[in-house]
Each structure stands twice: as C-alpha cells, then as structure tokens.
Amino acid sequence: MLDISWIREHRELLQLTADKKGIKLSIGDLLERDDQRKRLLQDVERLRRDRNRLSERIGEWLKQGKQVEAEEAKREVKAANEGLSALETKSDRLLQEMTRNAEDILQLLELPYRVVAVCIGDMSQKTHKQYDIETWMPSRQSYGETHSSSNLLDFQARRANIRYRDANGKLMYCHTLNNTAVATPRILIPLLENHQMEDGSVYVPKSLRPYLNGVESIRPS
C-alpha cells in the first residue's frame, strides 16, 4: 500500500499509470478525501480540548458557587460530546474502550501508569491512531511501555481481504484493531518492583490473591 505523502509527491505519475492501465481512479479525489480526513481529525482534537477545558472549569465554578456558569459549561460539554460521537468512527470508539480495558487491568494490579497518544512520526505506516500505556519502573526511574492499542482502519483488512456487507448490501472493508492486554514477561518488571517491600517480600495486589490461595505477600525463601 502506498504512503499518502508519496502519492502527493507523485500524483501526476500515478494518475498517468492508472489511466494507461484502464484503472478508474482520480488521484485528485483521493487527495481531497485525505484532506477531509485531516480536517475531521482537527475538529475532533478541537472538541476534545474544549471538552477538557470546560470540564476543569465546571469544578472550579461549582466550588466558587457560580452555578449558572457551571450549568452553561455542562451544556457546552454535552454539545462537545455529541459532536465527538458524530465525528468519531465506531472503530475509534472501540479503540478508546480497549485502552480503558488495559487501564482497568493496571488499576487492578495497583500500578502507577500513564497513557501516551503516539505521534504520527512514531507510528508505522499501517496505523491510524495509537495509544501506548507506560507503567512506572523504579529500577529505571522512568516509565516503560507495557501496553499498546491501535486502530488500523481498513489497512490490514484490505491486505487480508476481510469484508462485510453494510445495511444496503454494499461490500465494505472491515476496520481492524490491536491491543495488548498484558505483555508478559514485561509486566513482571513493574509488578515486582513497585510492590517490593523493605524486607524483600513482594506485596500481592488484592485482585491476584484469589489465584494464589489468598496469599497476601511473597517472601524470599
């Protein structure tokens, strides 16, 4: 699959090649669709910024007794959420859900972590959007990647020819997603280091105790 930047740089050559082979393709329309995609992504990011900014101010206004301002901000947040729902694809919403599932696991393991939105320069060609979850590793004195979730849109499905029929019977390519629930043995690093006690024993998170016959800590023999 060709990179969109390469297509932009060689649009005349690609259009000529398509015409010679009798392929019905408009490079101009393709690039216009990509421009529309970029504008939609910008709208999504703007709505998210507005929603986060307003969400913070609601709490401040409520503390200050500014009920009218807080209620107005709530209406604006609701409008921003509705706008986001309309703009985001179903696969993007599933990406958010999968990322939350990975966060739930780390919370159950009682580990400190952070979620990082990966910039386009660090993503592979196939990836549309990616989040990495990094967990605190004391021996490194830094966060280390332990989870990753990504939305590939239809890139992978086109190569594997994975399709479905929509409500109108039209064949469509599926969107595929990827998620690391628990990366073993990598997760053992923060699990052991963050839960090691001064006496050398390792605290067992409450969520794991049912699988260890109720053991609350592991002690060196």
Image (cartoon, rainbow, N blue to C red):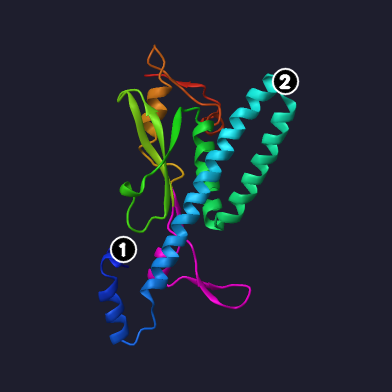
Image coordinates for residue 72, horizontal then vertical, percent: 70, 35
Instruction: Inspect the magenta stretch and tell me whether residue 3 lies in it.
Output: no
Kindly tell me whether residue 199 is visible in this rendering.
Answer: yes
Image coordinates for residue 219, horizontal then vertical, percent: 41, 19
Residue, disc 2: 65
Classify the position of the C terminus by image quarter.
top left
17 or 119: nearer the eye? Answer: 17
Disc 2 crowd rating (10 Å Cα; few below 14, some 14-19, many 20+) is: few
Report helix, strand or loop for mark 2.
loop
Image coordinates for residue 128, horizontal then vertical, percent: 41, 55
Residue 30 against residue 205 in the figure, above or below: below
148 or 213: nearer the eye? Answer: 148
- Horizontally, residue 90 falls left or right of residue 118, namely right
Residue, far top: 199
Residue 53 against residue 78 in the figure, above or below: above
Instruction: Inspect the magenta stretch and tell me whether residue 170 lies in it.
Output: yes
Q: Are marks 2 and 1 in contact (CB under 8 Å)?
A: no
Q: Which mark is residue 3?
A: 1
Report helix, strand or loop for mark 1.
loop
Which residues, given as a range, are shown in magenta? 151-179
Kindly tell me whether residue 160 is visible in this rendering.
Answer: no
Quarter of the rendering containing residue 165: bottom right
Q: Residue at x 33, y 27 (%)?
A: 142
Type of the residue with mark 1: Asp
